[in-house]
Image: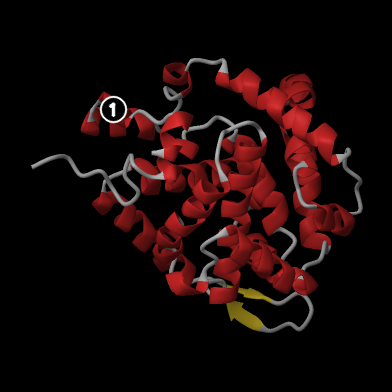
Amino acid sequence: MGADPGLFTPASVTWQLHGDPMMWVAGVRALYLQALHPRAVRGVMENSDFRRDAWGRLMRTANFVGTTTYGTTESAERAGARIRKIHSMLTATDPDTGERYGVDEPELLRWVHCAEIDSYLHVVRRSGFPLTDAQADRYLAEHRTSARLVGLDPATVPGDQEELAAYFEKVRPQLGAGADARAVDDFLLRPPTHPLLIPAREVLWQRVAQLAYAALPPYAHELYGRPAPRAAVVTRRLRATGTLLRCVPARLRWQLPPKHILRAMARLGPDARPAPYKAGR
């Protein structure tokens, strides 16, 4: 019997796209976008020490994405079960009404899922990763699987670009940049750090955060109240950053913890190596 390829398999668009280094910029964009849903971001603020552990939160999300993308079926299902169990025990207070609600409400899970998957697809594709519209639709359809893992009915999740655009149009009236979103914005621009690392924060991290913010949709810039460069300028910056990061040998990039891709290649063989040209297969 062959080794277990996992839930997505090397034949998926997801397998290829999630190996791209621009996923880190995409992850920060997702945080910016997710914070615009008042109930979703309140759930984060009340149930985690975001200001002190934002990097840990980002790494845990990256680990979940890596496990569900490149891990075995068993490890992916186990990761999903763990997330569902944690969410089932958490509640938060609506910032406007004072109502207590569960953070695993389908509406909130769907927002977090769509903001995340949209960010991955948008940033990586806009930065130069070659995907046709049909392949982009395939990517979104594949992520009905990740929606199921966090507790959503896959049928209620957008499965192509048209459905995703309609979803964002429908949810926009519920969005706003309240105190919690402002706190996320402030943190992402100026995360607390050791005094000796402040120069590195100014040179490196702020560029990542600013690029991620610039890649948000125009309505998000309006809500946050901070302008962004023209779309053509943002696209050039995304492409330049993607080109630079892709010059770093993949084997070197994949050495960073938790090494999901290298473990998948060890399990399945060298043909499982993610690559942009394989997305069209």
Q: How many marks?
A: 1
What x and y, as percent, mark residue 94?
71, 77
Residue beneath the point at 86% across and 55% down: 224
Q: Which of the image's four quarters has the C terminus?
A: top left
Residue on which disc 1 sits: 271
What x and y, as percent, mark residue 91?
57, 74
Q: Residues within 10 Å of mark 1 (few under 14, many from 20)?
A: few
Q: Which of the image's four quarters has the N terminus?
A: top left
Residue beneath the point at 41% across and 33% down: 278
Q: Which residue of the protein is positioned furthest toward the left in this rendering?
A: 1
Of residues 61 and 169, which is closer to you in this image? 169
51 sits left or right of 3 in the view? right
Residue beneath the point at 65% across and 37% down: 25
Of residues 204 and 29, which is closer to you in this image? 29
The answer to whether residue 195 is seen in the rendering is no
The answer to whether residue 160 is seen in the rendering is yes
Give the image quarter of residue 108. bottom right
Q: Secondary structure at mark 1?
A: helix
